[in-house]
Image (cartoon, grey):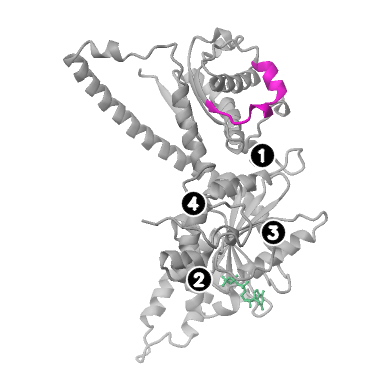
């Protein structure tokens, strides 16, 4: 079919057959369904809706849009919570239901269709939409999404002290705005704040080192990897608190590369950034950055993290009580000032008075970094005295707009590209399958009739299989592999960790 169009959002797949359908209905429909997806994820609903044209006279006049809800699959573990209002509407639905699960999915699909048709107010709809809450403005009734602050920095830069300081700043607001804190450093012995979720409650880092025969860095990395396997549960916990908190703070391991260059660091960052407005706070130890070479290395590191995460980025020059950060701002804004500092620094010239190789390299690098500095916000803070913390939060607020205008479109583009490549692979394998079938049919014309699926057959077995798989993973995991993120500290001593191979 030449005008066949397939498009997706999140886990949902839609199939439309003409452009009218796509232009007239896709935007509001997808918008609402995105909300269902989100609701579904939180409360264990897994819904897939396929939409095709024609046939839908039974959906009360919706036919003019040429839309049919053809089939859906849904798994529900507690239908008792299904909103009464939705039940009432759903009973008007005359679609023949082949199983209880499909019936429930039918209800949800029907509710969406009704919503579009009658333009019911959003409050009548039980599902919240991610994009709606992201776009919500301060002052309107719907609360804005909490802002995620990921603190990253070299060991000893003051990340934990900084998290403690911004936490106490938020507590001191009127009214207090206690943040939701995640500690992702499994090796830290003491944190100066009360973390809501602490990786140490889940994974015993020393036990991991022992069982896997690893050194300290390998132990931290493996502990983070194990924790990441359960990060969907962490996200669920965070999402449940999203209505009551304004800030979610992530404190990361001091071994910076373990978080910034590992798969688990990327998964955690991408997972939170696709659910909440997110900003990276890169903490710099200002007194240790006064040498041009150290400053340059720090900036290069920051630059690599920014381009890797593509998230809004704030340079936080910490410990300004010990060393004001003016020199750094000057070097960032005035290329020549940095050149002068570089030239005057000892070791910048060799025995013959020529600039050293390192000096020339840093000179050229500073030109490259000039472009990077333009995309940055820099603030000076003292986690000890609390100076500059307000300016930091101003920068966080400003970054919300950058997230919306730059990160989200980029995320959408990446998603679309991934979906397209998956679709191409699928189409390719379907084409090959069809070719094989044609050859088969030519060889044995009667086989197709024997294999045909009887329409009155229940497809319940398929559903059950799917359900068991999903429940197995989240509720009855394989022995020794389960990490309960909610478990209390001190219970993880005798865990048999899975073999990484
Ligand atoms: N003078 C001064 N010292 C600070 C400041 N912030 C942190 N420190 C000190 O810096 C040291 C390291 O602070 P931490 O908060 O443990 O640093 P971290 O980055 O979390 O360290 P890791 O956990 O190893 O990654 C501690 O001795 C803090 O007291 C500050 O604003 N001013």
41 on left or right of 140: left
Whether the residue carrying mark 3 lies under 8 Å from ligand 1 is answered with: no
Query: Does dot 3 land on a helix, a strand or a loop?
Result: helix
Which of disc 3 and disc 4 is earlier in sequence?
A: 4
Q: Quadrant of ligand 1?
A: bottom right
Which of disc 4 and disc 2 is earlier in sequence?
A: 4
Which of disc 2 and disc 3 is earlier in sequence?
A: 2
Q: Which residue is mark 2?
A: 298
Which of disc 1 and disc 4 is earlier in sequence?
A: 1
Q: Nearer the viewer, mark 2 or mark 4?
A: 4
Q: Which mark is residue 133?
A: 1
Q: In the rendered view, would you say 442 is above or below 497?
A: above
Task: Tell me what residue is drawn at x 73 percent, y 70 percent.
Answer: 386
448 on left or right of 319: left
What's the CA distance linking mark 1 and mark 2? 36 Å
Q: Which residue is mark 4?
A: 267
Q: Where residue 361 sits: x, y (%)?
A: 39, 74
Query: Does dot 1 land on a helix, a strand or a loop?
Result: helix
What's the CA distance linking mark 4 and mark 1? 23 Å
Q: Nearer the viewer, mark 3 or mark 1?
A: 1
Q: Which residue is mark 3?
A: 393
Query: Does dot 2 land on a helix, a strand or a loop?
Result: helix
* 77 within the magenta span: yes
């Amino acid at each position: 079919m030449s005008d066949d169009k397939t498009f997706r959002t999140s886990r949902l797949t839609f199939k439309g057959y003409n452009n009218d359908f796509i232009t007239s209905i896709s935007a509001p429909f997808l918008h609402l369904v995105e909300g269902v997806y989100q609701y579904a994820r939180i409360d264990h609903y897994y819904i897939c809706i396929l939409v095709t044209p024609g046939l839908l006279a039974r959906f009360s006049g919706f036919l003019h849009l040429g839309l049919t809800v053809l089939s859906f699959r849904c798994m529900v573990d507690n239908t008792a919570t299904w909103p009464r209002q939705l039940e009432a509407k759903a009973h008007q639905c005359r679609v023949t239901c082949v199983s209880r699960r499909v019936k429930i999915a039918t209800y949800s699909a029907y509710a969406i269709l009704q919503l579009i048709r009658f333009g019911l107010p959003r409050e009548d709809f039980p599902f919240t939409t991610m994009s709606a809450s992201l776009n919500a403005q301060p002052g309107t009734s719907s609360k804005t999404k909490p802002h995620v602050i990921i603190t990253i920095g070299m060991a000893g830069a003051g990340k934990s002290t900084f998290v403690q300081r911004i936490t106490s700043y938020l507590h001191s607001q009127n009214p207090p705005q206690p943040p939701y804190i995640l500690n992702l450093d499994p090796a830290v012995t003491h944190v100066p704040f009360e973390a809501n979720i602490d990786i140490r409650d889940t994974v015993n880092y020393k036990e991991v080192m022992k069982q896997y025969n690893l050194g300290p860095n390998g132990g931290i990395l493996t502990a983070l990897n194990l924790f990441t396997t359960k990060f969907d549960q962490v996200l669920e916990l965070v999402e449940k608190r999203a209505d009551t908190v304004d800030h979610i703070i992530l404190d990361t391991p001091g071994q910076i590369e373990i978080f910034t260059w590992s798969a688990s660091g990327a998964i955690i960052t991408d997972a939170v950034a696709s659910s909440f407005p997110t900003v990276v706070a890169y903490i710099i130890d200002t007194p240790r950055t006064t040498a041009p070479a150290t400053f340059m290395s720090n900036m290069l590191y920051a630059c690599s993290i920014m381009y890797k995460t593509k998230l809004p980025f704030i340079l936080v020059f910490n410990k300004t009580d010990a060393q004001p950060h003016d020199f750094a701002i000057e070097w960032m804004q005035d290329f020549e000032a940095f050149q002068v500092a570089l030239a005057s620094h000892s070791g910048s010239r060799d025995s013959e008075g020529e600039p050293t190789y390192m000096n020339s390299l840093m000179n050229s690098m500073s030109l490259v970094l000039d472009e990077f500095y333009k995309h940055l916000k820099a603030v000076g803070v003292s986690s000890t005295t609390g100076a500059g913390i307000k300016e930091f939060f101003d920068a966080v607020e400003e970054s919300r707009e950058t997230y919306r205008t730059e990160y989200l479109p980029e995320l959408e583009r990446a998603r679309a590209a991934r979906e397209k490549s998956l679709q191409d692979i699928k189409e390719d394998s379907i084409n090959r399958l069809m070719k094989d079938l044609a050859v088969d049919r030519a060889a044995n014309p009667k086989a197709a009739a024997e294999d045909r699926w009887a329409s009155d057959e229940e497809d319940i077995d398929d559903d059950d299989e799917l359900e068991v798989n999903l429940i197995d993973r989240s509720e009855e995991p394989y022995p020794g592999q389960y990490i309960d993120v909610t478990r209390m500290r001190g219970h993880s001593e005798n865990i048999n960790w899975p073999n990484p191979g």
